[in-house]
Every structure is written in structure tokens, then in C-alpha cells.
Image: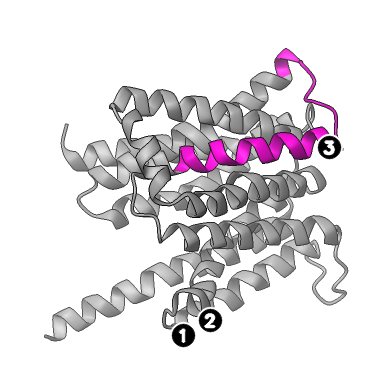
Amino acid sequence: MKTSYLAIGYGLGAVLLWSTVATAFKIALGFFSPLQLVLVATIVSSLVLLLILGLQGKLSLITPQFRQSPWLYLQTGMLNPFLYYLVLFKAYDLLPAQQALSLNYTWAILLPLLSVPMLKQKLRRIDLVAALLAYSGVVIIATGGNIAGLSFENPVGIALGLASTVLWCLYWIINTRDKGDPVVSLLLSFIIALPFIFMTLIATEPLPPLSVKGLLAGAYVGLFEMGVTFVLWLMALKSAERTATVSNLVFLSPVLSMCFIALVLGEAIEVSTLFGLSCILLALLLQQLLPYIKNRRLRGAL
């Protein structure tokens, strides 16, 4: 199979699986609290990543990679999976899946803004334009389209949804210092986070109930949000002749996610959600497309 077709195959597989997880979150949260779901999903994803590394013959990398940067993996583990998924699942617990999903996509808009003070990167004009457009979409979603009244339907849920994007961006910014194998790095973050997740749960809540349906739902989240899909996406990027070809597949995910939310969860997709999500996706498109067009013109002028 040609490399480009293989990359698109891996990318489509990852996007399809990611498109189901918003629905899976809501189903799993019907059985577990957000913290209980974090524990179940992290255990499952850790086991899956161990299996993948075993099949790749990379288990020997785990210990030396940890010894090189133990403090780094403690930081990344606290951010992802512990704090990020705890806050994200709480947002999904409070909000309709369609709203929580849409808010989560603003992390890609926030990342270049946070990279300015934290990574000393240059702020581009398009980043500000994209941020203005995307967060206008957030206001539309948060107010249910009643922008003039600025009456937020669930301010706590909205705040948690946006807070999760900050945590996710911080994770990726700190992760830029990691030079190790990415799958090993993810596993180390999860393994280090597990004791903290477990101790927090023991101190605050009962252990997750042993329901077969609940455990299957939690296992699905661990498999396809945190584990297998991440590896598929890495394989897609590694196989791609042009990274942009694969990266653009991400824009299919929210559309497919809305279909699953409507069909499986039975949520009526609000017009305000569609308008708000459209603003966010347009902002993402502009952020990626305009610099690419500008670079092409510069090359053509040379």
C-alpha cells in the first residue's frame, strides 16, 4: 500500500474513533462520577499502552526514559490524565455533549496564545483574529444564542470546559521538552498519575461500582480516547508524505461527533451550537490555511 494511502487510513481510523468518544463520555458518566471514570479509563489505557509497547519491542525504553526526566513525567502526569480528564469529564457531566465537545475544540486556538509567554514564540495577527472568532463562537454556545442578554445557561460547566483547554495546552507546552518515545512518554504520565488519582478517589468518593455495562463504557473511553487512537494518529503522521494531508482530517471529527451525539444520545442539536462550532472551526481553518497560503506566495515570488 502506498505510504499516503496508509497514512490516510490510519488518520481516518483515529478520527472515526475520536468522533465516538464524546458520546462514550456521556454514557460512561451515567455509571461513574468524573473521578471514578478517570481512574477506570487510566487503568485501561495504561494496560493497552503497555501491550502496544510490548508488541513494538519497546518495553526496555520505559525505565531509562523515566530516569532521564522523572520531574517532567510527574508534571505531565498531573496534567494528563489527572487534572485534564477530571475537569473535562466534569464539564461533560454538567453540559450537553454537543456543548462540551464544541468548547473542547478551542484548545488549538489557545495553544499559540499561551506559547507566546511560555515558549517565547511570536504572536501572529492571525492567532488574534482566530481567537476573537473562536471565542465569539463560545459566547454563542454558552448563551444558547442569546448574545444580547449574555445569560449563560450553565456557567460552571462552561468554565470547566474552557479550563480543560487550558490544562490540555499546558500539557502540550510542557511536553515540548520531552525528547523520548511519545508512546512511552504517554504511558509514563499515566502510570505516575494513577496513584494520585486512586488516593484522591479513596479520600473523597467510593470506589467505582462493578457494573459490567459501566466498566465496558469506561474501558471504551480508556481504549479509544487515551490509548489506541493516540497511537493510530502517531502512525498516520509518521506515514504521511505531507503532515497537512493528515492534519486536515481532524475537521471531520466534530461533524461525525455531532452525528453520534444525535443518533446515540438522542440530543437535539441546537442551532446555537452549530453556529458556535462553525465559528470555532472557521477560526481553526483560518489559523492553518492563511499562513500556508502566505508561505506559498512567498516561495512563488522568489
In terms of sequence position, does the residue under pointer 2 or pointer 3 come before the other? 2
Report the front residue among 266 and 230. 230
Residue name at image x 27 percent, y 41 percent = 7
Distance CA(mark 2)–CA(mark 3): 43 Å
List x then y, in percent, for residue 297. 22, 81
List x then y, in percent, for residue 217. 66, 24
Magenta residues, as a range?
Answer: 186-213
Given the image, on which type of amino acid does mark 1 rest?
Arg
Given the image, on which type of amino acid does mark 2 rest?
Leu
Q: Name the residue under label 2.
A: 128
Mark 2 vs mark 3, foreground winner is 3
Circles 2, 3 touching at the beta carbon (< 8 Å): no
Report the front residue among 26 and 253. 26
Circles 1, 2 touching at the beta carbon (< 8 Å): yes
List x then y, in percent, for residue 290. 37, 75
Distance CA(mark 1)–CA(mark 2): 5 Å
Q: Which residue lies furthest to the top in this view?
A: 212
Answer with the quarter of the image where residue 138 lies: bottom right
Q: Name the residue under label 3.
A: 203
Answer with the quarter of the image where residue 234 lies: top left
Q: Name the residue under label 1.
A: 125
Dot 1 falls on a residue whose secondary structure is: helix
Q: Is residue 139 left or right of residue 121?
A: right
Residue name at image x 62 percent, y 36 percent = 194
Dot 2 falls on a residue whose secondary structure is: helix
List x then y, in percent, for residue 223. 53, 29
Q: Is residue 63 above or below residue 288?
A: above
Q: Does the magenta stretch include residue 166?
A: no
